[in-house]
Amino acid sequence: MYNNENFDSATRKLFEDKNIAFVATLMKDGSPQITPVWIDIEGDSILVNTAMGRVKQKNIEKDPRIAISVVDRNNPYHMVSVRGEVTEQITGQVAEDHIDKMAKKYLDKDKYPLRTEGEQRILLKVTPKKVAVM
Amino acid sequence: MYNNENFDSATRKLFEDKNIAFVATLMKDGSPQITPVWIDIEGDSILVNTAMGRVKQKNIEKDPRIAISVVDRNNPYHMVSVRGEVTEQITGQVAEDHIDKMAKKYLDKDKYPLRTEGEQRILLKVTPKKVAVM
Protein backbone atom coordinates (compact mmCIF):
# COMPACT_ATOMS: atom_id res chain seq x y z
CA MET A 1 0.00 0.00 0.00
CA TYR A 2 3.01 2.27 0.47
CA ASN A 3 4.25 4.19 -2.53
CA ASN A 4 6.52 7.11 -3.29
CA GLU A 5 4.29 8.91 -5.73
CA ASN A 6 3.17 12.46 -5.28
CA PHE A 7 -0.15 12.94 -3.54
CA ASP A 8 -3.25 12.41 -5.67
CA SER A 9 -6.07 14.92 -5.34
CA ALA A 10 -8.18 12.84 -2.91
CA THR A 11 -5.18 12.43 -0.62
CA ARG A 12 -4.23 16.07 -0.91
CA LYS A 13 -7.79 16.95 0.14
CA LEU A 14 -7.27 15.07 3.42
CA PHE A 15 -4.58 17.62 4.29
CA GLU A 16 -6.51 20.59 2.91
CA ASP A 17 -9.78 19.89 4.71
CA LYS A 18 -10.16 20.64 8.38
CA ASN A 19 -9.17 17.18 9.54
CA ILE A 20 -7.11 16.65 12.69
CA ALA A 21 -3.79 14.92 12.01
CA PHE A 22 -1.67 12.78 14.30
CA VAL A 23 2.06 13.22 14.43
CA ALA A 24 4.51 10.72 15.89
CA THR A 25 8.00 11.84 16.88
CA LEU A 26 10.78 10.20 18.86
CA MET A 27 11.50 10.95 22.51
CA LYS A 28 15.12 11.28 23.64
CA ASP A 29 15.16 7.57 24.57
CA GLY A 30 13.87 6.67 21.07
CA SER A 31 10.34 5.80 22.18
CA PRO A 32 7.41 7.07 20.09
CA GLN A 33 5.13 9.92 21.11
CA ILE A 34 1.88 10.99 19.41
CA THR A 35 0.12 14.33 19.41
CA PRO A 36 -2.85 15.69 17.45
CA VAL A 37 -2.10 18.68 15.24
CA TRP A 38 -3.60 20.99 12.67
CA ILE A 39 -2.20 20.19 9.28
CA ASP A 40 -1.45 21.83 5.93
CA ILE A 41 0.11 20.92 2.62
CA GLU A 42 2.23 22.95 0.21
CA GLY A 43 3.38 21.27 -2.96
CA ASP A 44 4.52 17.87 -1.77
CA SER A 45 5.55 19.08 1.67
CA ILE A 46 3.37 18.63 4.72
CA LEU A 47 3.29 21.54 7.14
CA VAL A 48 2.93 21.30 10.90
CA ASN A 49 2.84 24.47 12.97
CA THR A 50 4.01 24.11 16.55
CA ALA A 51 5.65 26.31 19.19
CA MET A 52 9.31 26.47 20.19
CA GLY A 53 10.05 24.28 23.19
CA ARG A 54 7.11 21.92 22.78
CA VAL A 55 7.88 18.22 23.15
CA LYS A 56 7.54 17.46 19.44
CA GLN A 57 9.71 20.41 18.46
CA LYS A 58 12.44 19.30 20.86
CA ASN A 59 12.07 15.76 19.56
CA ILE A 60 12.53 16.60 15.90
CA GLU A 61 15.46 18.85 16.83
CA LYS A 62 17.22 15.70 18.02
CA ASP A 63 15.83 13.33 15.38
CA PRO A 64 13.91 14.69 12.35
CA ARG A 65 12.11 11.44 11.60
CA ILE A 66 8.34 11.78 11.83
CA ALA A 67 5.14 9.95 10.95
CA ILE A 68 1.82 11.64 10.17
CA SER A 69 -1.65 10.19 9.82
CA VAL A 70 -4.79 12.01 8.70
CA VAL A 71 -8.31 10.60 8.67
CA ASP A 72 -11.26 12.06 6.82
CA ARG A 73 -13.52 13.42 9.57
CA ASN A 74 -16.55 12.35 7.51
CA ASN A 75 -15.27 8.85 6.71
CA PRO A 76 -12.94 7.21 9.24
CA TYR A 77 -11.97 4.56 6.68
CA HIS A 78 -10.45 7.10 4.28
CA MET A 79 -7.02 8.00 5.54
CA VAL A 80 -3.38 8.57 4.71
CA SER A 81 -0.29 7.61 6.65
CA VAL A 82 3.06 9.21 5.87
CA ARG A 83 6.60 8.53 7.01
CA GLY A 84 9.17 11.20 6.41
CA GLU A 85 11.54 13.76 7.82
CA VAL A 86 11.38 17.36 8.92
CA THR A 87 13.64 18.99 6.34
CA GLU A 88 13.03 22.64 7.21
CA GLN A 89 12.08 24.62 10.32
CA ILE A 90 10.83 28.15 9.82
CA THR A 91 10.36 30.70 12.61
CA GLY A 92 9.41 34.39 12.55
CA GLN A 93 6.65 36.10 10.61
CA VAL A 94 6.11 33.20 8.20
CA ALA A 95 5.34 30.85 11.08
CA GLU A 96 3.19 33.46 12.88
CA ASP A 97 1.16 34.16 9.74
CA HIS A 98 0.77 30.45 9.12
CA ILE A 99 -0.77 29.76 12.54
CA ASP A 100 -3.33 32.49 11.77
CA LYS A 101 -4.07 30.70 8.49
CA MET A 102 -4.64 27.50 10.49
CA ALA A 103 -6.90 29.34 12.96
CA LYS A 104 -8.96 30.52 9.98
CA LYS A 105 -9.18 27.01 8.58
CA TYR A 106 -10.00 25.15 11.81
CA LEU A 107 -11.70 27.79 13.98
CA ASP A 108 -12.82 30.39 11.44
CA LYS A 109 -10.88 33.06 13.36
CA ASP A 110 -8.65 35.64 11.64
CA LYS A 111 -6.09 35.49 14.45
CA TYR A 112 -4.95 32.40 16.34
CA PRO A 113 -6.67 32.92 19.70
CA LEU A 114 -4.55 30.60 21.84
CA ARG A 115 -1.19 32.38 21.75
CA THR A 116 0.57 32.41 25.07
CA GLU A 117 2.94 35.10 26.39
CA GLY A 118 6.29 34.92 24.60
CA GLU A 119 5.23 32.00 22.42
CA GLN A 120 7.26 31.63 19.25
CA ARG A 121 5.66 29.62 16.47
CA ILE A 122 7.67 27.29 14.30
CA LEU A 123 6.64 25.78 11.01
CA LEU A 124 7.89 22.25 10.37
CA LYS A 125 8.18 21.30 6.72
CA VAL A 126 7.96 17.54 6.30
CA THR A 127 9.28 15.74 3.23
CA PRO A 128 7.40 12.46 2.82
CA LYS A 129 9.41 9.30 2.10
CA LYS A 130 6.57 6.77 2.23
CA VAL A 131 2.88 7.41 1.71
CA ALA A 132 0.12 4.87 2.38
CA VAL A 133 -3.48 5.60 1.44
CA MET A 134 -6.28 3.45 2.82
CA MET B 1 -0.63 17.32 31.38
CA TYR B 2 0.96 13.89 31.64
CA ASN B 3 0.21 11.83 34.72
CA ASN B 4 0.50 8.25 35.86
CA GLU B 5 -2.92 7.91 37.39
CA ASN B 6 -5.41 5.29 36.34
CA PHE B 7 -7.87 6.30 33.67
CA ASP B 8 -10.81 8.40 34.82
CA SER B 9 -14.25 7.49 33.48
CA ALA B 10 -14.31 10.13 30.69
CA THR B 11 -10.94 8.91 29.42
CA ARG B 12 -11.96 5.28 29.71
CA LYS B 13 -15.01 6.11 27.61
CA LEU B 14 -12.74 7.28 24.76
CA PHE B 15 -11.45 3.69 24.55
CA GLU B 16 -14.87 2.11 25.06
CA ASP B 17 -16.72 4.14 22.44
CA LYS B 18 -16.32 3.38 18.78
CA ASN B 19 -13.50 5.85 18.22
CA ILE B 20 -10.63 5.10 15.86
CA ALA B 21 -7.25 5.10 17.62
CA PHE B 22 -3.79 5.81 16.22
CA VAL B 23 -0.87 3.63 17.17
CA ALA B 24 2.78 4.56 16.70
CA THR B 25 5.42 1.84 16.71
CA LEU B 26 9.10 1.80 15.78
CA MET B 27 10.42 0.52 12.47
CA LYS B 28 13.60 -1.56 12.42
CA ASP B 29 15.66 1.61 11.84
CA GLY B 30 14.01 3.29 14.85
CA SER B 31 11.82 5.63 12.80
CA PRO B 32 8.17 6.06 13.84
CA GLN B 33 5.21 4.56 11.98
CA ILE B 34 1.50 5.30 12.57
CA THR B 35 -1.55 3.20 11.78
CA PRO B 36 -5.21 3.58 12.67
CA VAL B 37 -6.70 0.75 14.76
CA TRP B 38 -9.79 -0.37 16.58
CA ILE B 39 -9.24 -0.06 20.31
CA ASP B 40 -10.38 -1.61 23.57
CA ILE B 41 -9.63 -1.28 27.27
CA GLU B 42 -9.55 -3.88 30.04
CA GLY B 43 -8.73 -2.71 33.53
CA ASP B 44 -5.81 -0.38 32.99
CA SER B 45 -4.52 -2.18 29.91
CA ILE B 46 -5.23 -0.98 26.40
CA LEU B 47 -5.95 -3.70 23.86
CA VAL B 48 -5.02 -3.60 20.18
CA ASN B 49 -6.00 -6.51 17.93
CA THR B 50 -3.79 -7.02 14.92
CA ALA B 51 -2.70 -9.94 12.72
CA MET B 52 0.55 -11.89 12.84
CA GLY B 53 3.08 -10.53 10.37
CA ARG B 54 1.65 -7.02 10.07
CA VAL B 55 4.16 -4.18 10.24
CA LYS B 56 3.14 -3.07 13.71
CA GLN B 57 3.24 -6.62 15.06
CA LYS B 58 6.74 -7.13 13.68
CA ASN B 59 7.74 -3.75 15.06
CA ILE B 60 6.63 -4.42 18.63
CA GLU B 61 8.26 -7.85 18.45
CA LYS B 62 11.58 -6.00 18.05
CA ASP B 63 10.78 -3.06 20.34
CA PRO B 64 7.65 -3.11 22.55
CA ARG B 65 7.47 0.66 22.97
CA ILE B 66 4.26 2.11 21.62
CA ALA B 67 2.21 5.32 21.66
CA ILE B 68 -1.57 5.46 21.29
CA SER B 69 -3.88 8.41 20.71
CA VAL B 70 -7.67 8.38 20.72
CA VAL B 71 -9.92 11.28 19.81
CA ASP B 72 -13.62 11.54 20.59
CA ARG B 73 -15.34 11.21 17.21
CA ASN B 74 -17.95 13.74 18.36
CA ASN B 75 -15.46 16.26 19.75
CA PRO B 76 -12.00 16.40 18.17
CA TYR B 77 -10.69 18.46 21.09
CA HIS B 78 -11.35 15.70 23.63
CA MET B 79 -8.54 13.20 23.37
CA VAL B 80 -6.05 11.03 25.19
CA SER B 81 -2.45 10.26 24.32
CA VAL B 82 -0.67 7.33 25.93
CA ARG B 83 2.94 6.17 25.95
CA GLY B 84 3.61 2.64 27.07
CA GLU B 85 4.78 -0.84 26.25
CA VAL B 86 3.26 -3.99 24.87
CA THR B 87 3.60 -6.29 27.87
CA GLU B 88 1.62 -9.28 26.60
CA GLN B 89 0.82 -10.80 23.19
CA ILE B 90 -2.04 -13.26 23.04
CA THR B 91 -2.82 -15.48 20.05
CA GLY B 92 -5.38 -18.28 19.53
CA GLN B 93 -9.05 -18.32 20.46
CA VAL B 94 -8.84 -15.35 22.82
CA ALA B 95 -7.52 -13.14 20.00
CA GLU B 96 -10.00 -14.55 17.46
CA ASP B 97 -12.94 -13.94 19.81
CA HIS B 98 -11.68 -10.46 20.56
CA ILE B 99 -11.64 -9.39 16.90
CA ASP B 100 -15.27 -10.51 16.68
CA LYS B 101 -16.00 -8.35 19.71
CA MET B 102 -14.36 -5.41 17.88
CA ALA B 103 -16.39 -6.15 14.71
CA LYS B 104 -19.52 -5.98 16.87
CA LYS B 105 -18.45 -2.69 18.39
CA TYR B 106 -17.30 -0.93 15.21
CA LEU B 107 -19.33 -2.60 12.46
CA ASP B 108 -22.26 -4.15 14.34
CA LYS B 109 -21.34 -7.56 12.89
CA ASP B 110 -21.22 -10.75 14.99
CA LYS B 111 -18.20 -12.04 13.10
CA TYR B 112 -15.24 -10.05 11.84
CA PRO B 113 -15.90 -9.94 8.09
CA LEU B 114 -12.40 -9.07 6.87
CA ARG B 115 -10.49 -12.23 7.82
CA THR B 116 -8.06 -13.34 5.16
CA GLU B 117 -7.00 -16.93 4.40
CA GLY B 118 -4.67 -18.21 7.12
CA GLU B 119 -4.81 -14.98 9.09
CA GLN B 120 -3.87 -15.36 12.75
CA ARG B 121 -5.07 -12.63 15.05
CA ILE B 122 -2.93 -11.38 17.90
CA LEU B 123 -4.05 -9.31 20.85
CA LEU B 124 -1.52 -6.75 22.09
CA LYS B 125 -1.89 -5.76 25.72
CA VAL B 126 -0.44 -2.33 26.34
CA THR B 127 0.60 -1.14 29.79
CA PRO B 128 0.48 2.67 29.88
CA LYS B 129 3.42 4.54 31.41
CA LYS B 130 2.33 8.11 30.63
CA VAL B 131 -1.19 9.33 29.99
CA ALA B 132 -2.08 12.80 28.72
CA VAL B 133 -5.69 13.94 28.51
CA MET B 134 -6.59 17.05 26.53
Image (cartoon, coloured by chain):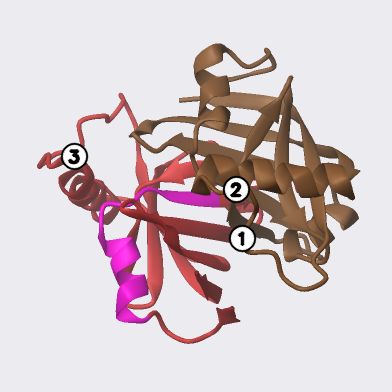
Chain colours: A red, B brown
Magenta-span inclusion, residue B57: no
| Magenta-colored span | A8-23
- Residue flagged by tag 2: what amino acid is it? Ala
Q: Are discs 2 and 3 less than 8 Å apart at CB?
A: no
Q: CA distance from mark 2 to mark 1?
A: 8 Å
Q: Element under label 2?
A: helix
> Would residue A104 be visible to someone looking at this image?
yes
Q: Are discs 2 and 1 less than 8 Å apart at CB?
A: yes
Q: Quadrant of the N terminus of chain A?
A: bottom right
Q: CA distance from mark 3 to mark 1?
A: 38 Å
Q: Position of residue A19 (x, y in %)?
A: 32, 52
Q: Element under label 3?
A: helix
Q: Chain of mark 2?
A: B
- The residue under label 3 is A107
Q: CA distance from mark 2 to mark 3?
A: 34 Å
Task: Residue at 62%, 43% (x, y): give it.
Answer: B102
Q: Position of residue B128 (x, y in %)?
A: 73, 28
- The residue under label 1 is B113
- The residue under label 2 is B103
Residue A132 in the image: above or below residue B23: below
Q: Element under label 1?
A: loop
Between B38 and A55, which is closer to the camera in this rendering? B38
Between B22 and A125, which is closer to the camera in this rendering? B22
Mark 1 Cα within 10 Å, few/some/many (few <14, many 20+)?
few
- Residue flagged by tag 1: what amino acid is it? Pro
Task: Residue at 81%, 46% (x, y): give it.
Answer: B95
User: Which mark is nearer the camera, 3 or 1?
Assistant: 1
Quarter location, residue A90: bottom left
> Would residue B65 be visible to someone looking at this image?
no
Mark 3 Cα within 10 Å, few/some/many (few <14, many 20+)?
some
